[in-house]
Image (cartoon, grey):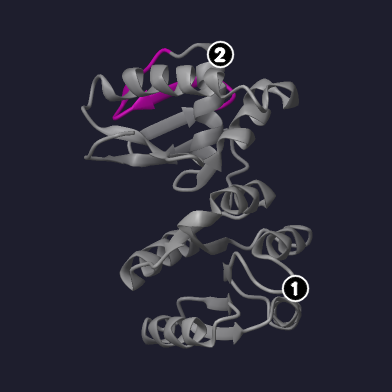
Amino acid sequence: MPGRILVIDDEPQITRVLRAALTAQGYDVRTANDPEEGLQVFHDWPPDLVVTDLMMPGLSGVEVTRAIRAIAATPVLVLSVREHERSKVEALDAGADDYVTKPFSIQELLARVRAHLRRAPERTTSVIEAGDFMVDASAHSISVLGKPIHLTPKEFELLLHLSRHAGKVLTHRTLLTTVWGAQSAHQPEYLRVFIGQLRKKLEAETGKQYIQTEPWVGYRFMPEGWSGNQD
């Protein structure tokens, strides 16, 4: 079986559509139209991935995410509308792994689900191999398509954190706090400068784009690279 998925959304039509689409792909699916019920299902029937709405009566998707993160590392994908950007960022800071904006394409959602389910748990080894990249945390070295790339200590620390969460949206606050400390959480100019420097160094030899901007939210590291305009 591809995996077990729990869908939490207070709109019955959404849970029906997602159940049908996910079941058709071979997933074992449970749904809940109430966040408290959803958390009970999570405890009784531990899923491999959770899809939760962001804005619900009672507990919000942010609170659901925090409750899950308190006990498990299960991937959490949140559904949000464009007007709720702040809540979406709060969910990501609370530990959500990704988001899809309503109205969304079922094919996009299925692709995100597949990506998170096949992603192995974070490696405990010091060497991370992903896509075009090999990052050695112990040696403070990185190569792209086999070619060594020189990075400053902060650039390396930033890329190391991005590579450990490849494919996942990391918020500005998360990256700033991790790399520069809590006192820098509200100084995004640090991040813009270093992301710009990283992009130039990583893309100079290959022509590929590796760091995708998620407007108003943060950044997503794509180790295989992609073609398209960067924000």
Q: Nearer the viewer, residue 1 or 54?
A: 54
Q: Name the outermost residue toward the front.
A: 83
Q: Secondary structure at mark 2?
A: helix
Q: Residues within 10 Å of mark 2 (few under 14, many from 20)?
A: few
Residue depth check, mark 1 versus mark 2: number of the one nearer the observer: 1
**Residue 191 against residue 53 in the figure, above or below:** above
Residue 229: x percent and y percent? 24, 36
Residue marked by disc 1 = 58
Residue found at x 47% / y 86%: 13
Q: Nearer the viewer, residue 230 or 222?
A: 230
**Residue 31 against residue 132 in the figure, above or below:** below
Q: Residues within 10 Å of mark 1 (few under 14, many from 20)?
A: few
The answer to which image quadrant residue 204 occupies is top left
Q: Amino acid at mark 2?
A: Pro
Give the magenta-colored segment's residue range.
137-150
Distance Cα–Cα, label 1 vs label 2? 45 Å
Residue 163: x percent and y percent? 49, 37
> Is 149 a magenta residue?
yes
Q: Which mark is residue 153?
A: 2
Residue 102: x percent and y percent? 43, 65
N-terminal label among 1 and 2? 1
Residue 49: x percent and y percent? 57, 69
**Residue 91 against residue 24 in the figure, above or below:** above
Q: Is residue 211 left or right of residue 60?
A: left
Quadrant holding the C terminus: top left
Q: Is residue 3 left or right of residue 204?
A: right
